[in-house]
Amino acid sequence: MGQTITQKILAAHCGKETVEPGELINARLDVVLGNDITAPIAIEEFAKIGAETVFDKERVMLVPDHSTPNKDIKSATLVKTMREFARKHNITNFFEIGRMGVEHTLLPDEGLVLPGDAIIGADSHTCTYGAIGAFSTGVGSTDLACAMALGETWFKVPEAIKFVYHGRMPKWVGGKDLILYTIGKIGVGGALYCSMEFTGEAISNLQMAGRFTMCNMAIEAGGKNGIIEPDAKTLAYVKPRAKREFKLYKSDANAVYKNVIEIDVSKLEPIVSFPHLPENAKPISEATHIKIDQSVIGSCTNGRIEDLRVAAGILKGRKVHPDVRLIVIPATQEIFMQSIKEGLTQIFVEAGGAVSTPTCGPCLGGHMGVLAEGERAVATTNRNFVGRMGHAKSEVYLASPAIAAASAVLGRLGSPEELR
Amino acid sequence: MIRGKVHRYGSNVDTDVIIPARYLNTTDPEELASHCMEDIDSEFVKTVQPGDIIVAMDNFGCGSSREHAPIAIKASGVGCVIANTYARIFYRNALNTGLPILECPEAVKGISNGDTVEVDLEAGGIRNVTTGASYQAKPFPPFMRQLIDVGGLVEYAKAKLGSR
């Protein structure tokens, strides 16, 4: 019986030829990740284990990105805990403010997570790295603590669902629209405990930025991981960055799937997910009556240079609607610098937008764009739960950078097509 | 034996509503508990008593990986959560933080908000005292049982590290 790419990576990390769905395995880990929300609890638990130090100071990675630059004294204290732990254990990959980025954009861009890796991170969007052909999944702080000590963790081998995207994507439709549409189709629990494997012509044609966006949101369908087989595009992205050797895996033609879902992308419109679940996906044409107060472009889902280029292309020579606050957040310092070099930052500021240093801030209602009661935001982020970006009676509409940029100009949800 | 009143919720109760991110600047269980569920149930913190039981439908604990969510529920006094299904990260986190969780769709169907329920965690037995109906939760898989028996993942890791 054939194996999926996820099975093959897991088998390779537990010293087996093959593994079967449902099997419990103990897997060696290539990278173990924490952030300023989850690492402080992990550090407390780590102390209880009694390990002298971490299993590998280069493979435990700590990124203070959620409440940074420190939003208040309590957050500053948590980041300090993390920084002191990193210093004590000589953690190589601790990323300080001014040299950091949003974790799930930073690590692949730095060549620290690679194809064929098995990775856990104490952040649910750790599933992002499936875009380069790694097995990667989110865990909590105690799992992180034990993995920091042992360099391994237990997994139940997941069943896989194969998504086949046929056809060519229309203009303004990208990775964000494909994944929002998919979540809308199967629901927020539609891939519970499963591996989501994204395949087909549209995925082959999708650039890396869009692939990262899709795998990033696998968790929003309950998926254990999202994954895309590495191809020439993957190698072009990974090779110049890779800090160590890596291995490419592909699913066997006779691999077994729990379900195969075929989607024709050629007739898709840009998608907006309405409050308060990512599964409330609607075509943009059904959303143009929704007025907005804020537009956020950034996050681990859509804070890449490609995302900023799309947004800047729409905002160039235009002004943000008087009733809207536009907040643009490049995901890493490198992307920020590139955005300056290409003149994108100037476009955002001239349009009347605010540009921030990298942070997860507004996505989780932490800082840098928290919503008041009754306010509405369109955001390129990944969640629109009750209270996600602020007040329990505020609303978040999830969309692509193109829709977020066009909506910022229109003052309501809308497509770039309407700006002509 | 756990005995308490039921606080009932629907499907997809996410970790952002269990404990909103605006309170994640602390790791103190009591402080986290003081805001538990507030965005979907402002009465929860005011009415919850030690031993009370949360009953919910599908995909409980979806969303963020924050371990603060099971910590907040446990510190609020809740003795057990019963749901149809759990999001996978929450499932691991509950196990790791010692928050008892049971899967039992029949019980979820047969229990209403405010009912008094008794739970025998060892045996997975659930009795709705208000209606008199009894249910049997799905047993934990053997490996999870082993983790629980050794005192949780930290103890498991400690033993593993010691044996190296």
Image: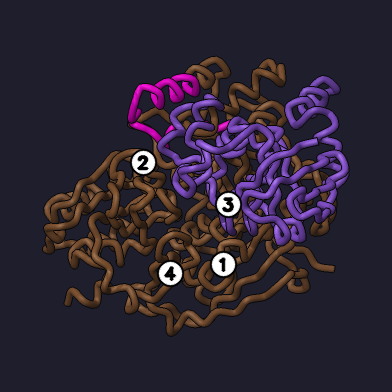
Chain colours: A brown, B purple
- What residue is shown with label 2? A361
SS for dot 3:
loop
Q: Position of A266 compared to B79: left or right?
A: left
CB of mark 2 within 8 Å of CB of mark 1?
A: no
Q: Give the number of marks.
A: 4
**Disc nearer the start of the sequence (4/1):** 4
Amino acid type, residue under disc 1 in the picture: Gly
Q: Report whether mark 3 lies on the same chain as mark 2.
A: no
Residue B62 is labelled as 3
Query: What residue sits right under mark 1 in the picture?
Result: A187
Which dot, 2 or 4, sits closer to the camera? Answer: 2
Give the residue type that dot 4 points to. Answer: Asp
Mark 2 vs mark 1, foreground winner is: 1
User: Residue drawn at (14%, 56%), measured in percent from left and top?
Assistant: A351
Inter-mark Cα distance, 2 to 4: 23 Å
Q: Which residues are magenta?
A: A60-83
- Front in this rendered view, residue A420 or A95: A420
The quadrant in which the C terminus of chain A is found is: bottom left
| Residue B76 image point, x, y percent | 58, 33
Question: Disc 2 to disc 1, how far (Cα)?
Answer: 26 Å
- Residue highlighted by disc 4: A177
